[in-house]
Amino acid sequence: MKKKVSILFIALLLTAVAASGFGADYPTKPITLMVPWVAGGGTDTGARILAAIAEKMMGQPIVVINKVGAGSQVGLTELARQKPDGYYIGCVSMPALNTIILDPERKAVFDVDSFLPIINQVLDPGLIWVKADSPYKTLKDLLDDAKKRPLEIRASTTGILGDDHLAILMMEEAAGVKFRIVHFEGGAQQFTATLGGQVDVSFDNVGSVVTKIRAGQVRGLAVMDPQRSKFLPDVPTTVELGFPNVISNSTRGILGPKGIPDPVVKKIQSVFSEAMKSPDHMDKMDKVGLAVKPLMGEEFRKYYRNLHERCKPLVEAARKAR
């Protein structure tokens, strides 16, 4: 009996020692950073800038891949099913993640507890924009026409029930208008359709469009934030224009499947935090108009949970509007 107890004790001791050292040598192979949106959009751009800097500090390649479909649901499904060892993580957009979970018609195989928030990179304010030669010079021009022609003005989003879709619904309610909503799978498709005249106005984020505004290809009508964007100081905010409740942004952070060991999480946080603070990262993010907002640990976890709660009434309103 004593021999069996001793063997059991040794086994438990070895397990505890192994667990305490799990991830101490992480990473020993390349890391995959999945982006659930098309290449060329704001989330993808920020992820690739960060990965190129972080991999030099990590000591292993960080390979960015795009898993596109269903407004990021395809990529999120794959992320939730990954082995929680830190070798497959995702650059995820919120509230798109939250609204997919909250909409029963999406039949998501994951929920809010399926993911581990690791570190946030970007908080990108929403933007209402049109092509440069659009007849809409101001937000008032757009809304005045929309009031005259209900359901005729084509307004595009970068995904069903994403932040841009919710922003359109908020503007409709606040301004008393109705748009004909057109959904795309990401910013690149939306940009092509807007310039091609397939849609009349688009709702996206500052970081996705700022370089195109600087190039004179498109015009910003309003930033959906209380404060003007440092990247678009001449574009008024929705608050300035009389719509204090039309506030929208996209938060982009690094998430993993639940269960990643704490030492691995801390290593990812340490490296990515250092990379985000680097002058190289900040300079490149400024050039593409992406506002860096690092959050990690309890602060990011709390933000993740609170955002989910804030999305519940918005999603319910959106479902009723269908």
Image (cartoon, grey):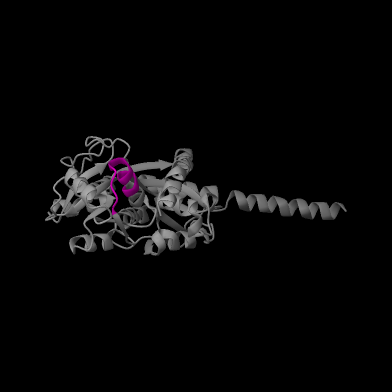
Give the vertical position of 52 relative to 306 (above or below): below
Q: Residue furthest right?
A: 1
Give the vertical position of 153 relative to 245 (above or below): below
Q: Which residues are magenta?
A: 168-179
- The residue closer to the viewer here, 315 or 85, is 315
Question: Percent from the top left, x then y, of residue 224?
Answer: 28, 42
Give the vertical position of 311 relative to 97 (above or below): above
Q: Is residue 178 magenta?
A: yes
Question: Percent from the top left, x then y, of residue 252?
Answer: 37, 49
- The residue closer to the viewer here, 83 or 109, is 109
Answer left or right for 237 relative to 22.
Answer: left
Answer left or right for 59 relative to 7.
Answer: left
Question: Percent from the top left, x then y, of residue 90?
Answer: 43, 56
Question: Percent from the top left, x then y, of residue 247?
Answer: 32, 40
Write the residue at 70% across / 50% down.
13
Q: Is residue 83 magenta?
A: no
**Residue 132 in sight:** yes
Give the vertical position of 173 relative to 89 (above or below): above
Considering the whole magenta stretch, tell me its main secondary structure. Answer: helix
